[in-house]
Image: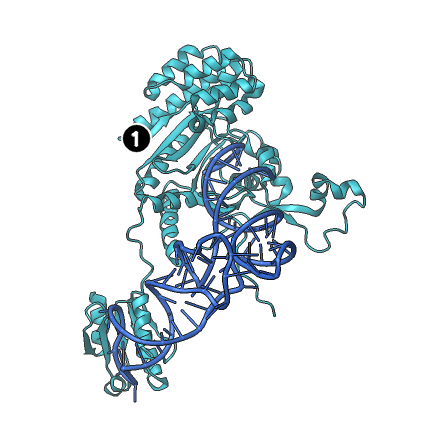
Amino acid sequence: MNTIKPALPRGTRDFPPDVMVKRNFILNIIRAAFEKYGFLPLETPAMENLSVLSGKYGDEGDQLLFKILNSGDFMAKVDNDEKTFLDYGKLTPQISEKGLRYDLTVPFARYVAMNQHDIVFPFKRYQIQPVWRADRPQKGRYREFFQCDADVIGTDSLLCEAEIAILVHEVFHNLGLRDYVLKVNNRKILEGIAESAGDKKRAGEFFVLLDKLDKIGLHHLKELLEENRFHRDFIARIERIITLTGDHQHKLDFLERNMSGSEMAREGVGEIRKFFEYLESLEDGIKQTELDISLARGLSYYTGMILEVKATGVRIGSIGGGGRYDNLAGVFGLPGMSGVGFSFGIDRIFDVMEELNLFSDHNLPATKILITNFDPETEKYAFQILSKLRRADIRAELFPDPVKIKKQLNYANKREIPFVLMIGSEELKKGVCSLKDMNRGEQEELTIDALIEKMNRI
RNA sequence: GUGGAUGUAGUUCAGUAGGUUAGAACGCCUGAUUGUGGUUCAGGAGGUCGUCGGUUCGAGUCCGAUCUUCCACCCCA
């Protein structure tokens, strides 16, 4: 038989024990925060019908969907004509009807639409599951990664946005990750700007370009806008707005004075005002939260407030983001259901924390005591002691094979097990056990009860 | 999807202008120590040089394709 070279599909990873300990640390903090804020757990299948996924993420998104080949004789029903075989677009729907989920929000919308009569609204759910994108991997960019989503659907109250902002701060505080900024903006302002410039239809295109400001700088952004045939007046207007400095009050005042012509923009300004009012009503509420009028976010379904967390001082994309979408479940036959949500990117949070060395003391779950295995005669006695230790809630294990003691002690060393219990024929005869302290190198003879008492004391 | 870089023992890396049996460190295994580890000493195992093909008397080294990882673009968590 040929051996197969073990390998992973591109962009996917194993998570070894030491990594899992750290990932679980992050996950537990996020999950605890979600539950504290009243979100309920939900899971959906890894795969969805392509009809659910397609067309929700733009043309780019459709390309990045992993499609699942129909099972069985997938060629049986394919049109028997050459055009079908040569055209990817024609062939694909005939051989694939399912795909791996691309995010958690669309499956959530599907779930809400399907179960609308049983759900109590407003519905707050959290969901922590992997998603898949057929992207080209880089650092901080994987083809399989986890999203940790929390969404509220069935209310348009800005309290939800404010709560999300507070939740975000709580999570990063608990993680010990301080170098970040929560940027917020409102799509209505951006649309108002586009509208007032007479380019309302091109708003989406404008968002995508504007989102690059961070990366390419103002100068290149202006060039790009020009190349894309946006009016010179429009560009000048944009420049004035996105180069505004000062706090959110200052920026909002400016917008209000200059955007009064646009009902849309005024609404957006009002929403941001209210959002900040909520935060300001709390002590320390607006720390690390800033209004960034150039924040656009790519996803096409956002309609109101948008939020994004950027790690500062580490070269990596955003580590979380979200926003309000007015009509997400509409395509599934449930119109007028407004929702707002946020997603933590745990894989990137992990990378950032690793890079900033914030995982100093996260040890593997440690066994406290290892019982050596001398020979088949003492094995049963050892097995009974093992059971007693565990009944006393002491983390213990018995070495499964009667190999050399040197080897067993070595195992304890490598696993960083602090105590080893020697149980050989002498101990068996006396009905005791010898406890070795691996750090001090000392050894003492104890009764089982004395051992349990000692272990519980340590 | 487009362009660029990369790939040698388990790991990190050497490998000189194509030229015998591809090296080091760490790790691993065995022994010194047949019921006592972490140190030390002695010995040992482990490589189809990412994969496939080509040039050559001869390829780890040159060429092509392909895959992985990384970087830029696109997009995004």
What residue is shown with label 1? A287
Q: Which is nearer the eye, A36 or A84?
A: A84
Residue A134 appears at what percent x and percent y? 56, 43
Instruction: Say left or right for A94 vs A278.
Output: right
* Chain A palette colour: cyan
Q: Which residue occupies 33% across, 60% down?
A: A365
Q: Which residue occupies 47% across, 27% down?
A: A211
Q: Which amino acid does label 1 sit on?
A: Lys
User: Dot 1 surroundings within 10 Å: few (below 14), some, or many (20 or more)?
Assistant: few
Instruction: Say left or right for A203 vs A450.
Output: right
Find residue B39 and report its image quarter: bottom left
Label 1, secondary structure: give it.
Answer: loop
The residue at the far right in this view is A81
Q: Which is nearer the eye, B54 or B43?
A: B54
Q: Which is nearer the eye, A319 or A142?
A: A142
| Position above or below: A231 against A218 | above
Task: Indicate the chain coloured blue by its letter.
Answer: B
Colour treatment of the image: by chain
The residue at the far bottom in this view is A429
Residue A405 appears at what percent x and percent y? 31, 78
Q: Which is nearer the eye, B8 or A396?
A: B8
Let me know if residue A371 appears in the view: no
| Position above or below: B59 against A436 | above
Q: Mark 1 lies on which chain?
A: A
| Position above or below: A51 against A241 | below
The C terminus of chain A: image quadrant: bottom left
Find residue A387 and report its image quarter: bottom left
Q: Which residue occupies 57% across, 63% down?
A: A4
Residue A137 appears at what percent x and percent y? 50, 44
Find residue A447 and report its image quarter: bottom left
Residue A201 appears at what percent x and percent y? 58, 19
Let me know if residue A92 appears in the view: yes
